[in-house]
């Protein structure tokens, strides 16, 4: 689960103190109030979305008065911000962070990732951080420095000092930077993050370090250890995910409009792929499990139909352990007390598929039957008038 910048900063403040003062605002009025609370002649307003690239996309701006803070927040909140890291539709801004402006001498990059190659957590750093970091890493890969973390010990202090020095820091700031890097490494491990990225870590003309931007991704597999992190769930799509997970379903919301109900993660991925291959866009990834019970399938169907963007539903089930007639029954149960407003395409193959088809055909539900993945995908696209390519 990705954390918003303001959430990640709150979390990290328990480990380190190099943060500019900042207050989150959910309304333009609040943004104006926050500006006054900070009490400086200037503040930076930052759109809170779960994607980077906001600076280049107009999601970050320095303002000079409470009125300006208010009016810029008014422009952002409720709008959709499109950045190089979002989809073309962008992401809705629900809050802004009002933060004190820090004078910047140099922008540095520091990140912790889980590195597949070395199979360890990895500290990465670059002396040329900021909004052009992707270009820098392509143009000058020699400017990216790494330090693998010992899985048992964590980061060694000498590694933190070596990284600080690679970032071009020397003299009295070196000790401070190494301490900051050590603190972040502890946060990365203890909070079970899969990504922690500081970009920029600002070095001020006066030799102070300041964590201006944080990107953090929390590993949901450890949510049982972090009830405080798991309890932060802001957007409606995420609430569908939360509900699905309470039923033991594997649901991931996507940007499209074709709802998919599939058994088995591999088949679910293949279903999403084939929809995209022919020019459609899946609304979700939903794996009801290889051993899907009728109960679970019915719940999955209900969860799926909560998505207001749906234009069609594709059920793709291969009956192995689970029998197709059980699934057919579950579909009927799920649709007993609600009207299906979108076309439903069903592909049921495997154990008892014939029986399943008979059950569905006599149910009176309006269903398009298909055989095979390709046929199913094309019929789903057809149902929403997309010409398959
Ligand atoms: P991102 O574009 O989503 O990564 O958002 P950032 O928070 O990293 O901001 C983008 C850029 O805005 C930074 O690289 C800085 O150059 C600039 N910026 C952000 N906050 C401040 C600040 O407090 N002072 C100054 N001088 N620049 C800032
Ligand atoms: Mn940034």
Image (cartoon, rainbow, N blue to C red):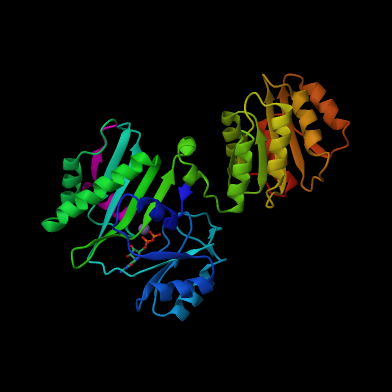
Over which residues does the magenta segment extend?
A: 133-151
* Quadrant observed for ligand 2 in the rendered image: bottom left
Relative to 108, residue 28 above or below: below
- Residue found at the very far left of the displayed protein: 171
Residue 151 vs residue 347, the one in the foreground? 151
Q: Is residue 149 magenta?
A: yes
Classify the position of the C terminus by image quarter.
top right
Q: Is residue 255 visible?
A: no
- Please name the residue shown 35% across and 65% down the image: 21
Give coordinates of residue 132: x percent, y percent: 32, 58
Q: Nearer the viewer, residue 164 or 36?
A: 36
Residue appearing at x 86%, y 31% in the figure: 361
Nearer-the-camera pick, 376 or 120: 120
Q: Quadrant of residue 191?
A: top left
Residue shown at 68%/42% (left/top)?
303
In-image side of 117 versus 365 (left or right): left
Name the one closer to the observer, 134 or 42: 42
Would residue 327 appear left or right of 157 to someone viewing this image? right
Q: Image check: 269 left or right of 121? A: right
Counting from the top left corner in percent of width and height, residue 344 is at 76, 40
């Amino acid at each position: 689960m990705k954390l918003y910048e303001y959430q990640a900063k709150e979390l990290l403040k328990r480990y380190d103190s190099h943060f500019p003062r900042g207050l989150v605002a959910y309304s333009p009025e609040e943004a104006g109030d926050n500006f006054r609370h900070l009490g400086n002649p200037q503040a930076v307003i930052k759109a809170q979305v779960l994607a980077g690239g906001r600076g280049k996309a107009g999601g970050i701006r320095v303002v000079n008065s409470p009125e300006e803070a208010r009016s810029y927040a008014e422009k952002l909140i409720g709008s959709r911000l499109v950045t190089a890291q979002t989809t073309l539709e962008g992401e809705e801004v629900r809050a802004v962070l009002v933060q004190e402006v820090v004078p910047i001498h140099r922008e540095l990059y520091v990140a912790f990732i889980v590195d597949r190659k070395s199979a360890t957590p990895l500290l990465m750093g670059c002396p040329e951080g900021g909004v052009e970091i992707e270009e820098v890493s392509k143009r000058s890969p020699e400017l990216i420095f790494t330090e693998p973390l010992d899985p048992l010990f964590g980061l060694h202090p000498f590694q933190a000092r070596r990284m600080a020095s690679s970032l071009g820091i020397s003299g009295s700031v070196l000790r401070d930077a190494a301490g900051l890097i050590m603190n972040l490494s502890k946060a990365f491990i203890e909070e079970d993050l899969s990504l922690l990225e500081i970009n920029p870590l600002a070095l001020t003309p006066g030799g102070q370090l300041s964590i201006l931007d944080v990107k953090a991704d929390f590993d949901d597999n450890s949510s049982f250890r972090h009830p405080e992190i798991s309890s932060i769930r802001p957007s409606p799509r995420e609430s569908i995910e939360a509900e699905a997970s309470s039923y033991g379903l594997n649901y991931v919301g996507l940007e499209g409009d074709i709802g998919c109900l599939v058994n088995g993660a591999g088949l679910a991925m293949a279903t999403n792929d084939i929809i995209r291959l022919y020019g459609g866009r899946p609304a979700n990834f939903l794996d009801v499990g290889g051993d899907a019970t009728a109960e679970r399938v019915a719940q999955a169907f209900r969860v799926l139909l909560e998505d207001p963007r749906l234009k069609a539903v594709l059920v793709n089930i291969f009956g192995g352990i689970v029998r197709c007639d059980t699934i057919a029954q579950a579909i009927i149960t799920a649709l007993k007390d609600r009207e299906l407003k979108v076309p439903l395409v069903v592909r049921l193959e495997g154990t008892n598929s014939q029986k399943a088809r008979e059950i569905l055909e006599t149910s009176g539900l309006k269903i398009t039957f298909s055989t095979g993945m390709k046929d199913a995908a094309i019929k789903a696209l057809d149902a929403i008038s997309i010409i398959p390519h």
